[in-house]
Image (spheres, rainbow, N blue to C red):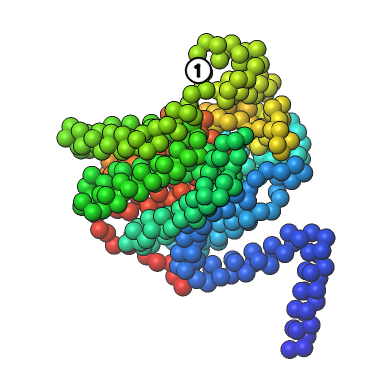
Amino acid sequence: MPQRSAFWVAAVVSLAALAVFEPRVTAAPVAVAIAVLVWRWPAAALHVAAFAALAVRPSLDVFSERRVGVGPFALSPAVAFGAAMLWVALVLAARRRRDGLRTWTDARLFRTHVWLFVAYGIGVYSGWHWYGAAGLAQGVRELVRVASIVAAFLVVLWWIEANPQASGRGWAYLVVGTLVPIAVALTQLVTGQGYLEGDLLRISGTFSHPSNFAQYLIPFIMVAVAGSAASPAMFRALRLGWALGLSLLVALTYSRTALLALAISLVLLPILMAARTGRRGLAQGVVVVALVGALGWWLAGDLIRARFAGVNLGVVAWEEARQGVSENSFTWRLITWGGLVRLGLLHPLVGHGGGMTTVLNPMIEEGSGLPFSAHDDFVKLFFETGLLGLACYVLYGIRLCSWALRRARTVGSASAPTAYAVTASLLSLFFFTAGVAELAVNTAILHALYGMLALLTVPAEPTAPAPPLRR
């Protein structure tokens, strides 16, 4: 007994000494402890991890801001969350394998995500090939970030597989996850301490940028709108009130991209639902969407007009961009995209490497002194992974949206409006905004969308739940 005590004392002292020189060393015993707990109590671990993925992650985005001198593996709450989620998913996957359960319960989803990982794998290779250890580190960071998002998706899938009746609880967790960001946004609005752009106050909640906060709210607006038509009168009023309140918050972010994405989502919703609901359903959907749009315009029309007033999409804007003159955000984006595409053509097949946009972009953010992001997913993927990686990413997006649409067409009638709302949001943010929404880099938004997609995997008809993991 004394020998065992002496061993533990020596281990703790050694770990403390190592932590003085490298604090991240303390992650090793924490990882071991998490693995033991997850392996011992997998059902409880699934529930806790699913709650974290659905409700906790949106409140951490503000801690992920880039700063000069911060390396690719700098620790932050958001990074620690992603690493922990990935580790928990790996342990649970090993436990499932031992218990005879598959990691991917849907082969189509597995094949879809193969293309995603191939795209980011190309980024790892190209970064290492062209820029050595620095490029490799950036590419690995991006790959791990994406893997943690998919890991959270799998965790929620496994949780729903084992507990189909928990779907309603999952949606409640998603709503709970909106409360802190919304509360912070309202506080910013009242105190005037939000994201200041000159004299313009833009609320951002717990997100690092107002546009990210606005885009995060879009699928929640769409779910509320889609379910209102079939709800009783009282719940219809609550849903529409929730949708209008969130829409007003979107307007107060002054994000043109988010306003465009929301408008596109509202247009897509009745069109997608028409295949299932017929002409009558299409007419009802158009009426509901038009009503929400009209009320939203009545509440925030002046804000929207003011935000779009200075945008010039005509010939003059293109000519200014060609000359390198930026008079508004549209010409600025054209200049940025043009510069990144020209640099990307130096390595057109495999790109410069994952995460290298914010290292090599010649456009520098004045406030932070750091290179800007691409402000477009497809430009980013071309610059970082070349034509090969971009093709893989586009194929992944097509397959994921197709899977979501297929689920919407096959789920039960009660869940169909919600499924179509999530699909419309995904299509809008991924493709119909031409990549400007930057969905690929908005980790918190992907957590929310993936969580919603996972909750849609509940069988249309009651079936026996999957066998639980053995204790």
In the foreground, 422 or 94? 422
Left/right placement of residue 391 relative to residue 100 reads right
Q: Is residue 264 above or below residue 142?
A: above
Which structural element holds mark 1?
A: loop
Residue at 42% x, 54% y is 174
Residue at 26% x, 53% y is 235
Left/right placement of residue 435 relative to residue 65 reads left
Q: Is residue 81 visible?
A: yes
What x and y, as percent, mark residue 442? 54, 42
User: Which image quadrant: the N terminus?
Assistant: bottom right
User: Where does label 1 land, which residue?
Assistant: 313
Residue found farthest to the bottom: 1
What x and y, as percent, mark residue 162? 38, 62
Residue at 42% x, 38% y is 426
What x and y, as percent, mark residue 186? 49, 50
Left/right placement of residue 361 relative to residue 91 reads right
| Crowdedness near tag 1: few (<14), some (14–19) or many (≥20) residues, C-alpha within 10 Å | few
Q: Is residue 267 above or below residue 161?
A: above
Q: Is residue 117 visible?
A: no
In the foreground, 280 or 326? 326
